[in-house]
Structures are given as C-alpha cells and as structure tokens.
Amino acid sequence: SDEVSFGRFGKEVELAMLFIDVKESTKIVDAFRLKTAARMYQSFLRGITLIALKNNGEVRSFNGDGILVTFYGDSKCNNAVRSALQMMDFVNSVLKPKLKSYFANNKQAQNLIFDCGIGIDVGSVFVVRGGAKGSDNNDLVWVGNPTNYAVKLSAQSKVQITSTTSSVPKTKTYN
C-alpha cells in the first residue's frame, strides 16, 4: 500500500482475488441482538483472517461481514484455493456447530443457517488510492474483473473459482 499514492498514479498487479461473505446476514441481524450478531461476525472475521494469513494472503478490506483477500506470486492460485477450502471447512466444522443452538433457540432464526459464499478470480488489477488525501478516510481501490468476479461469485454458491486465461471465463463450483 505504500507504493500507491494519490493522483493519477496506480500500479497494475497480477493476483488472485478472494472474496468471502456471510449469506443472509441481514436476516441474522434482524433475528438477534446487535451484540450477539457482532460476536458471530467477529468469530467469522477472525477465523477467516487467520486462514488467509496462514496461506500468504493479504487481507485488503472488511466489508461488513465480507472480506477481500489478495494473493500474489507464483503460488497465488494454489494459496487462494487452499484458503477457500480451509475457510469453508472452518465455517462448516467450527462456526456452524457453535452457532447451531443460537439459531435453534431463536424463533426468528430457526430456518436460518449460518453460511457463506466464496468467489475467486485471477487476473490483472489496477490499484489506485481513493478517498480524501491526508486523512484516515482513504484506502486502496482494486479496479478490474478479478475483484468484480470474486465478489459476484461469492453470492452465487459455496465456492466458485474462475479461470480467465481465455476470453471466456471458465467457472468451477464447489459445494
């Protein structure tokens, strides 16, 4: 992030972009006290962040209950896929069992299941700094299809990975 300053400057990078997001999060917030929902999200965000870091990912933003992670280098694709599978295992093996009783004991949440979607795309992204210069209100902006596809794919299923090596993206879905 130190390499990207304000102005017309940016940096083009080849990366694997992963986005993971809690599904039906609005229903979770509607069903539980805000402090309870916040503790659920904190557990989710902490576990996902640790998995990303363990696999050489760089957490680039927290978007409410979603996390944007970038992977660089020769192993970027393997690291992103390994992270996605470990993240899904964390949600299924750790979070869901712990949260199951919260959902079962809440009339508004009895039909809900704590779940997430993960999207991964690989390609070239142009990184710029956006916001207000000289304040705490600026960050990196990731412009390009890998960012857009990763976010969109996360909403469609459990894990979706695209390969944009040809003119038509190929998508593989893992449930």
Image (spheres, rainbow, N blue to C red):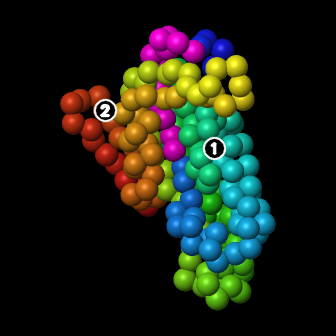
Q: Does any portion of residue 146 appear in the rendered image?
A: yes
Amino acid residing under circle 1: Phe
Q: Which mark is residue 62?
A: 1
* Amino acid at the residue labelled 2: Thr
**Residue at 38 percent of width and 41 percent of height:** 149
- Quarter in which the N terminus is drawn: top right
Q: 38 or 52, which is in the foreground?
A: 38
141 sits to left or right of 56: left
Q: Residue at x 57, y 65 (%)?
A: 25
**Alpha-carbon neighbours of circle 2 within 10 Å: few (<14), some, or many (≥20)?**
some
Residue wearing tag 2: 164
Name the dominant secondary structure of the magenta segment: strand
User: Does the image show residue 58?
Assistant: no
Residue 5 position, x and y percent, is 59, 13
Residues drawn in magenta: 6-19
Residue 18 part of the magenta-drawn span: yes
Badge number at residue 146: none
